[in-house]
Amino acid sequence: MTRILLSGCSGRMGQVIASIARTRSNVEIVAGFDVNTAINSDFPVYSSINDCPVDINVVIDFSNPAAFNTVTGFCLMNKIPLVMATTGLTEEQISNLSGIAEKSAVFHSANMSMGVNLVMELAKKAASFTEGLFDIEIIEKHHGNKIDAPSGTALAIANAINDALDDPKETIYDRTLRREKRDSLEMGIHTIRGGTIVGEHTIIFAGNDEIIEIKHEALSRNIFAEGALKAAVFISDKTSGLFSMSDMINDG
């Protein structure tokens, strides 16, 4: 049984994770951390993570980038593996995860969906195979309450594609000020926000007389919760190292 402290337990994703964990026999949410302690839970919730006296195996953080230092500091001090699932991290925070992982195990993915990560692998193969022949564009759609843009997943897809190319492309976020034709060495990322869209990412490979699209659409937040719980089990016995969805997929 993997005993989990859930950071951000009172948020939308936190509640979904807690709900799904109740149906699993190999995991248990035994404590929570959130500034909002008013929501009823079947586990103790602490407004300060350092006040948690419960014995835990792993921390899942699905909260806010502002809590990054608090959560990572707690995991470092107690040598507890961390699943960092919070989106919108700064480049500095993402970079800091590597240093933290030298002392305590960290699992980080821009998107906790297994499907999205499989799409990334497909996009890398397609980019490598079509390099120099197809233009690449990424479209991402999310609900109107999402704060960061473009999404961390869209950026991760772009980075994965560039890793597969001999000549990496420049990512372009806005063409409104450009009165010129598209450069073959650019890759556009387009953001749409509205309604209750859970998440949709489309990679377009536009060639001469043909178009290839690789698309992933999230129909509920359950897929992210499922991925986070799988990651918690995967990393619970690790003492150090930086792990990703790719590691878990290949390990399985």
Image (tube, rainbow, N blue to C red):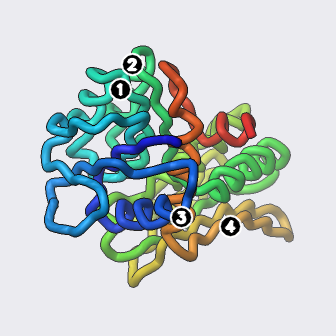
Closer to us: 250 or 147:
250
Q: Eyeballing the image, is 124 above or below 34? A: above
Closer to us: 185 or 247:
247
Task: Please name the amino acid that badge 1 sits on.
Answer: Asn
The answer to whether residue 155 of the structure is visible from this angle is no
The answer to whether marks 3 and 4 mark residues whose Cβ atoms lie closer than 8 Å is: no
Q: Which residue is mark 1?
A: 96
Frontmost of labels 3 and 4 is 3
Q: Residue at x 47, y 78 (%)?
A: 197
Q: CA distance from mark 3 to mark 1?
A: 34 Å
Q: Which residue is mark 2?
A: 99
Element marked by disc 3: loop
Is residue 224 rendered to the left or right of residue 90? right
The answer to whether marks 4 and 2 mark residues whose Cβ atoms lie closer than 8 Å is: no
The location of residue 219, given as percent across then percent down, is: 57, 76
Q: Which mark is residue 77?
A: none
Task: Please name the amino acid that badge 3 sits on.
Answer: Thr
The answer to whether marks 3 and 2 mark residues whose Cβ atoms lie closer than 8 Å is: no
Which badge, 3 or 2, is on the more N-terminal residue? 3
Task: Please name the amino acid that badge 2 sits on.
Answer: Gly
Q: Which residue is mark 3?
A: 23
Which badge, 4 or 2, is on the more N-terminal residue? 2
Q: Which mark is residue 215?
A: 4
The answer to whether marks 1 and 2 mark residues whose Cβ atoms lie closer than 8 Å is: yes
Closer to us: 100 or 22:
22
The answer to whether residue 150 of the structure is visible from this angle is yes
Element marked by disc 2: helix
Q: CA distance from mark 1 to mark 2?
A: 5 Å
Is residue 35 rendered to the left or right of residue 17? left
